[in-house]
Image (cartoon, rainbow, N blue to C red):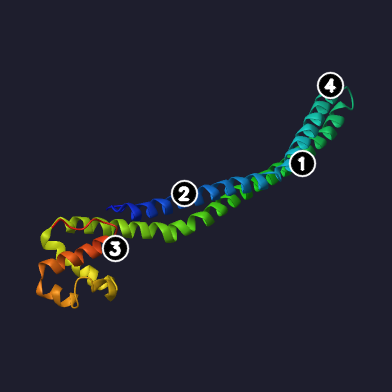
Amino acid sequence: MKPYAEIASVRGRQLMLDGLVVVWLLVFLLLAVHANDLVSALRTPTTALINTGANIAAMFAEGAAAAAQLPFFGSALSAALQQGQAAGEALRGVGQQQDDAVSALATGTALLVMLIGLLPPLLLWLPSRLRYAKAAGAAALAREDAHALDLLALRALTTLPPAELRIVGDHPANAWRTGDPEALRQLAALELRRLGLHPPTP
């Protein structure tokens, strides 16, 4: 695999595109963090609800404990105050449930934003870069083998437009069929240039 071209202009375009992809991902990462913060701001009232419920439960618990020390009706009063403690704990539980729901929503929103940002690079950029790296790597290996130049030449015949192929001659396909060494080298050079690679050594 050869991830980058050898020709500077082609390699520069590849690096620029890769840089744009990195910037794109960073932008969506920042958007995901911002979205998480915006949704998390909804936790403010739930936090207040949790604190209020906890304070009510603590207040009634202290009252129940003190009432239990009173003679005669202390146990009845303590039981009544414990009902208030239970109500406070229930209120805190409701607040905690809402807080958990907001937290899950904030996380889900951030993940959704990040997924939206990841899809274009994963579906468009990454497959293209992998295809190039594989093709360029195979072409670079074939360039070093004189017996494999005809494969590069054949690739040029099947991928390049006729106008480019006529640089080799009026009948490039016929030159390939007859195994003309110079034509094969020129066709291979065209294919290598298409991939941003240097031509084969004469």
Please, what is the three-letter code of the amino acid marked with disc 2?
Val
Q: Give the label, 1 or 2, closer to the camera.
A: 2
Q: Residue at x 73, y 42 (%)?
A: 46
Identify the residue position indicated by label 3 in the image. 194
Mark positioned earlier in the residue sequence (2 or 4): 2
Identify the residue position indicated by label 4 in the image. 69
Query: Is disc 3 placed on a helix, strand or loop?
Result: helix
Residue 152 seen in the current view: no
Separation of marks 1 and 2 at Cα, in angstroms: 46 Å
Q: Position of residue 160 (x, y in %)?
A: 28, 71
Query: Is disc 1 placed on a helix, strand or loop?
Result: helix
Identify the residue position indicated by label 2 in the image. 22
Mark positioned earlier in the residue sequence (2 or 3): 2
Please, what is the three-letter code of the amino acid marked with disc 3?
Arg
Query: Is disc 2 placed on a helix, strand or loop?
Result: helix
Identify the residue position indicated by label 1 in the image. 91
Q: Quadrant of the C terminus?
A: bottom left
Q: Residue at x 13, y 75 (%)?
A: 177
Separation of marks 2 and 3 at Cα, in angstroms: 25 Å
